[in-house]
Amino acid sequence: MSSSGQDTSRGQDTVDWPALRAAARAVMERAYAPYSGFPVGAAAFADDGRLVVGANVENAAYGVTLCAECSLVSALVGSGGGRLVAFTCVDKHGDTLMPCGRCRQLLWEHGGPDLLVETVRGIKTMRDVLPDAFGPQDLEERS
Ligand code: THU
């Protein structure tokens, strides 16, 4: 157990998924999504038990938009780094949303294959959600 009381072991049964969902729904309410009208909230536990959250932040130059996962990863790095161990993402109805392809790559970088991800088909790992991923290891092994 960490000081926050969150068990950081990797078993999915030990993760407080309801707390994670509640945090994702709360931050979704603070999204800046005036162009799409599609607010997204993301929440994750880091390996020290820290809760990190993020919402999407859109821009008049549409392509500059930051996904909720981008904000979450920035929050992770800015609050001390570490590894993501459990992640969820919700749409404006509070329902589970799959991370887009680009964001799966971001999650892979900061959580790796064992990161638990809440999906529309239940809890899976990143190795299921992004099979045969390219990652930091490829840079080491193939350079
Ligand atoms: N969006 C996210 O924040 N995360 C995703 O994984 C999927 C898409 C946002 C980006 C944009 O602001 C809105 O959803 C519509 O695409």
Image (spheres, rainbow, N blue to C red):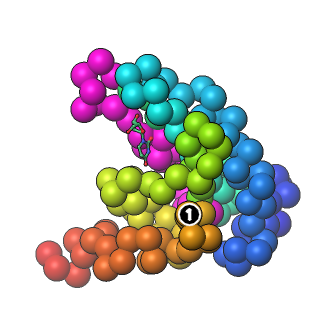
Q: What amino acid does circle 1 point to?
A: Val
Residue at left offset 78%, top offset 61%: 16
Where does the image place residue 76, in percent across and percent down from the top left?
54, 47
In the image, taking residue 102 as reference, residue 118 lies left or right, namely: right
Would you name the residue on which mark 1 appears? 120
Where does the image place residue 74, in percent across and percent down from the top left?
47, 41
Q: Quadrant of the C terminus?
A: bottom left
Q: Is residue 131 above or below residue 42?
A: below
Residue at left offset 70%, top offset 50%: 21
In the image, taking residue 69 as reference, residue 12 lies left or right, namely: right
Magenta stretch, residue numbers: 59-86
Residue at left offset 58%, top offset 37%: 92
Q: Quadrant of the N terminus?
A: bottom right
Q: Quadrant of residue 64?
A: top left
Q: In the depicted view, which residue is nearer to us: 92 or 22?
A: 92
Q: In the depicted view, which residue is nearer to us: 35 or 10?
A: 35
In the image, taking residue 112 as reference, residue 14 lies left or right, namely: right
